[in-house]
Amino acid sequence: MALDFKGRMAYGDYLKLDRLLSAQVPLSDKQDEKLFIIVHHVQELWLSLIIHELEFAMQNMRDGKAGLAFKALARISRIQEQLISAWDVLSTLTPSDYLTFRDTLGQASGFQSYQYRLVEILLGAKDERMLAPHRHTPQVYARLEAAFRGPSIYDEAIALVQRSGLDVPDSLLNRDFSKTHSYSDALHDIWLQVYREPERYFELYELAEELVDVEDHFQQWRFRHMKTVERIIGHKKGTGGSSGVGYLKTALDRTFFPELWAVRTDL
């Protein structure tokens, strides 16, 4: 085994580890701030991969390559498990530990994560107010706005249902994609047909279950986020001015794919 890497690409070169590891720059001399930074860096890296896989899944759904889309959705669910478990690490930060460096954060808050916002948009949460914190970064704002104006992964799923021969109302196919999808009785009945005849509509059945898996994990992530915040700061306001735990609790009531959850009651 060659041990001299002079003139050749080594592990650290390929991964750009010098850049990656130099990004953790605490603004205080407190022991626990590095933990705080690394946990959030790790989450942002996983969010980047989720976006990559979501966009890949959506493109393959448009191209009629459902198998590749399903593979990407299954991978997203495994990535989400890593995101959820990251809160266990951050939960080792006690309230007293956090207070030693909280003031160094200024107005910085996870609420401002544009990658988290992009994941929400791609899944179907369309709230134009949530674009405002990113106006000061034109490239980021442009990317968010493009996704905001375009179809979500659920819109792509509905289009795939139509191409599979089921009669989807035109109002669901040709709608204003900048609006969050609203519950549809007609779509509920279509998914009910799929779930009652899974062998006949197996591709759509698998698609529905992959989407439910993604949302299930997303809600678990939201819950662990809320409980971690409550454990560390209680019911104080967040650093970015949000209501903190109160805001995070309201997110638990929002769903991306309402018909896929409702159909379970009617089987």
Image: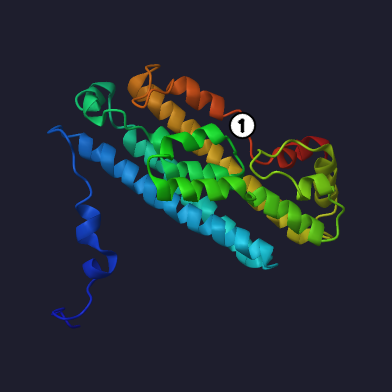
Nearest the viewer among 183 and 130 is 130
Left or right of 154 in this view: 84 = left
Secondary-structure class at tag 1: loop
Residue 13, quarter of the rendered image: bottom left
Indicate the quadrant containing the C terminus: top left, top right, bottom left or bottom right. Answer: top right
The image position of residue 34, as x and y in percent, is 21, 40
- Amino acid type of the residue that numbered disc 1 sits on in the rendered structure: Arg
Residue 235, quarter of the rendered image: top left
Residue at the spot of label 1: 254
The image position of residue 259, as x and y in percent, is 75, 40
* Residue appearing at x 56%, y 44% in the figure: 121
Left or right of 99 in this view: 192 = right
- Dot 1: few (<14), some (14–19), or many (≥20) neighbours within 10 Å? few
Can residue 171 be seen by looking at this rendering? Answer: yes
Above or below: residue 126 compared with residue 227: below
* Residue appearing at x 60%, y 43% in the figure: 215
Left or right of 77 in this view: 155 = right
